[in-house]
Image: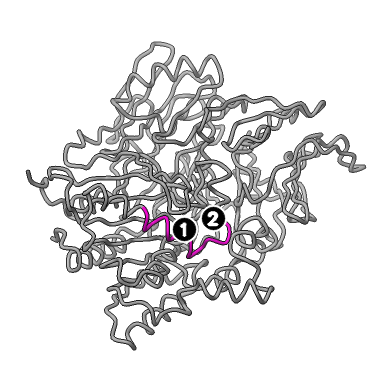
């Protein structure tokens, strides 16, 4: 038995030739992302045309990830920041002038951003913070960019679900963090009724998914209502406050990764009709993601689309206003981006993108084990193809957040490591989403403690199964995962043979202090609940005791540190202090700073450089393959 051919970094992590297809509102055109100018840009072609007939309508120098069709089926809205600074603007591009410079519909000052935007009838409704601390609603003329204030917010913690002044709902947060929902009877007088509450720390990033019907008469939430540990999808009637369970799966939670869909390309949680705003389907987390249809029409479409899945799961779908012309992109563990166009009128499909057979890639399977304190834990294990799974070098790859989760599907970074001969373990440690309220709240005050124990317990499971060689264990973490990587080296200095910290923070108090000002009032259910309050002396002392910045002298493991100079979440002084402290003590440490990146890399040149360094680092200390 032998590993398949060595796949170079540049090939393994190459920009996809075709991704994120979306059908236009009238069903006549297709928009998608494809390489141009060294990154992913937007292309448009006729629904029956090929890529050779397509028109590239953007010339960005940093890959686009978020876009949508406008109602004219000729124009696209897309979101972009500058070098990863997360000051998001929305731009217009399209067929009317495909060679034009990007038209910024939201020319905000530095430090301000758009958090939501949608278009209808030539008007873009955008929620943004030109006043910095407050997010107001504006109407923007798609053609001219003329901007009109629709609603000015006066309370960062209370928001109306509508933006037109009609009766709808109001969401808010009480002083103790309880999430509150009111049915608004009269916005002028302020008459409203409390119809629902939720435990705040169960939703550290806010209650999501969250949707309101087009007539503002039904509020739809992922909820723990009824003492359910798992997240169920429920509806709340405006007039009566009556609650109804729309979708549930015993032992499984509604997937909330969609809250990160724009930032990290995660699959959406809800599928919503572009014409009626009706929810067509909801996704559940678990060993494999599962989409559950909620309308009879989409149930028919879903059944036909799943015939094309080839062993995968349905990941992303789009449709025209008539819900007859569809695009479908599937999730597999050993290939990425299998996509079709499907016409429900004729029950016919056309292949849009074939990623290949996946024979060279490892298979990913869900595993479970019990933490040392009895908490059930879930993880995903990817084994290198072509070799016996015995005594392998293993890398535990730690997700960020912590309020998200790893899931079954293709991960190019995981597959790169597997191709080098490593088993890769992705642990959904306590505090991760996707496994119910008990699991997420088990992460409270466990930064650098129970979260790290979960990672070690996962490695011990793999060693106990004979899969992993205990002398060749590595750890790679991004963002929050980078922090957990550093704390692992402090807490268990002899356990891991090599480590990579990718844009991780090293000081919990600094993390809370480095958040944008408008974020701080929202922290009661996340960082304040899960880490502590730096204004409290006891909490501050505890937070410092769990901050690698105060424990650099414990680190002995060879380490590679990766950082983005434009990172708005982790100031460059943090990784620099770690590197300087280790070098002063003679501990082996590599350091790569990308000047044009933020909290996570997008530039292919930087990504390739980062992974060449990672490959070499792990090869030197764990014995995997190198180029």
Region of the chain picked out in magenta, as a range = 443-457
Helix, strand or loop at label 2? It is: loop
* Residue identifier under label 2: 443
Which residue is most to the front?
373
Rendered image: mark on residue 520: none
* Residue identifier under label 1: 451
Determine the residue positioned at 51% across, 46% down: 433
Q: CA distance from mark 2 to mark 1?
A: 7 Å
Give the camera-side residue of 209 and 375. Answer: 375
Q: Is residue 410 left or right of residue 518?
A: left
Instruction: Choose top left, top right, bottom left or bottom right for residue 131.
Output: bottom right
Contact between marks 2 and 1 (CB within 8 A): the answer is yes
Question: In x, y percent, where is residue 607?
Answer: 31, 60
Q: Is residue 9 left or right of residue 86?
A: left
Question: In x, y percent, where is residue 359?
Answer: 17, 37
The question of residue 52 being in magenta is answered with no
Structural crowding at the residue carrying mark 2, measured as other residues with C-alpha within 10 Å and reported as few (<14), some (14–19) or many (≥20)? many
Question: In x, y percent, where is residue 177?
Answer: 72, 53
Which residue is most to the bottom?
584
Determine the residue positioned at 66% across, 35% down: 227
Give the camera-side residue of 140 and 586. Answer: 586
């Amino acid at each position: 038995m032998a590993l398949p051919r060595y796949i170079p970094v540049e090939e393994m992590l190459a920009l996809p030739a075709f991704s994120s297809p979306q059908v236009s509102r009238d069903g006549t055109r297709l928009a998608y992302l494809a390489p141009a100018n060294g990154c992913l840009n937007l292309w448009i072609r006729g629904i029956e045309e090929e890529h050779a007939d397509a028109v590239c309508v953007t010339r960005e120098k940093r890959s686009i990830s978020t876009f949508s069709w406008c109602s004219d089926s000729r124009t696209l809205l897309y979101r972009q920041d500058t070098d990863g600074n997360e000051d998001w603007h929305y731009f217009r591009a399209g067929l009317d002038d495909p060679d034009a410079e990007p038209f910024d519909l939201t020319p905000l000052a530095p430090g301000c951003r758009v958090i939501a935007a949608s278009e209808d009838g030539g008007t873009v409704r955008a929620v943004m913070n030109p006043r910095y601390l407050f997010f107001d609603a504006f109407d923007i003329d798609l053609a001219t960019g003329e901007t009109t204030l629709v609603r000015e917010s006066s309370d960062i913690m209370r928001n109306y679900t509508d933006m037109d002044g009609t009766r709808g709902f109001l969401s808010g947060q009480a002083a103790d963090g309880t999430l509150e929902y009111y049915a608004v009877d009269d916005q002028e007088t302020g008459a409203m009724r409390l119809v629902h509450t939720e435990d705040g720390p169960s939703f550290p990033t806010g209650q999501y998914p969250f949707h309101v019907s087009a007539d503002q008469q039904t509020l739809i939430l992922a909820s723990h209502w009824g003492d359910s540990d798992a997240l169920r999808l429920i509806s709340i009637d405006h007039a009566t406050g009556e609650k109804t369970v729309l979708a549930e799966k015993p032992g499984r939670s509604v997937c909330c990764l969609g809250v990160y869909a724009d930032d990290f390309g995660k699959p959406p949680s809800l599928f919503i009709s572009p014409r009626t705003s009706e929810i067509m389907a909801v996704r559940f987390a678990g060993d494999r993601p599962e989409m559950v249809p909620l309308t009879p029409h989409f149930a028919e479409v879903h059944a036909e689309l799943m015939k094309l899945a080839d062993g995968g799961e349905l990941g992303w779908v789009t449709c025209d206003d008539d819900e007859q012309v569809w695009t479908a992109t599937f999730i597999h563990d050993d290939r990425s981006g299998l996509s079709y166009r499907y016409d429900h009128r004729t029950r016919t499909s056309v292949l849009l993108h074939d990623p290949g057979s996946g024979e060279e890639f490892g298979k990913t399977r869900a595993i479970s084990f019990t933490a040392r304190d009895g908490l059930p834990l879930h993880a995903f294990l990817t084994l290198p193809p072509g070799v016996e799974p015995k005594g392998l070098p293993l890398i535990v790859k730690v997700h960020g957040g912590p309020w998200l989760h790893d899931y079954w599907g293709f991960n190019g970074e995981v597959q790169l490591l597997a191709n080098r001969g490593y088993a890769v373990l992705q642990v959904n440690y306590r505090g991760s989403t996707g496994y119910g309220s008990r699991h997420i709240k088990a992460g409270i005050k466990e930064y650098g403690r129970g979260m790290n124990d979960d990672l070690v317990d996962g490695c011990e499971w793999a060693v106990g199964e004979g899969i992993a060689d205990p002398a060749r264990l590595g750890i790679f973490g991004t963002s929050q995962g980078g922090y957990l990587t550093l704390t692992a080296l402090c807490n268990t200095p002899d356990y891991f043979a090599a480590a990579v910290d990718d844009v991780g923070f090293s000081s919990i108090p600094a993390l809370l202090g480095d958040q944008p000002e408008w974020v701080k009032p929202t922290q009661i259910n996340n960082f304040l609940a899960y880490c502590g309050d730096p204004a409290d002396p006891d909490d501050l002392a505890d937070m410092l005791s769990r901050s690698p910045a105060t424990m650099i002298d414990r680190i002995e493991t060879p380490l590679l540190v990766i950082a983005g100079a434009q990172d708005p979440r982790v100031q460059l002084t943090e990784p620099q202090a770690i590197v300087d402290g280790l070098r002063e003590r003679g501990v082996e440490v590599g350091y790569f700073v990308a000047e044009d990146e933020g909290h996570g890399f997008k530039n292919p040149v930087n990504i390739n450089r980062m992974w060449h360094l990672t490959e070499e680092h792990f090869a030197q200390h764990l014995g995997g393959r190198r180029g």
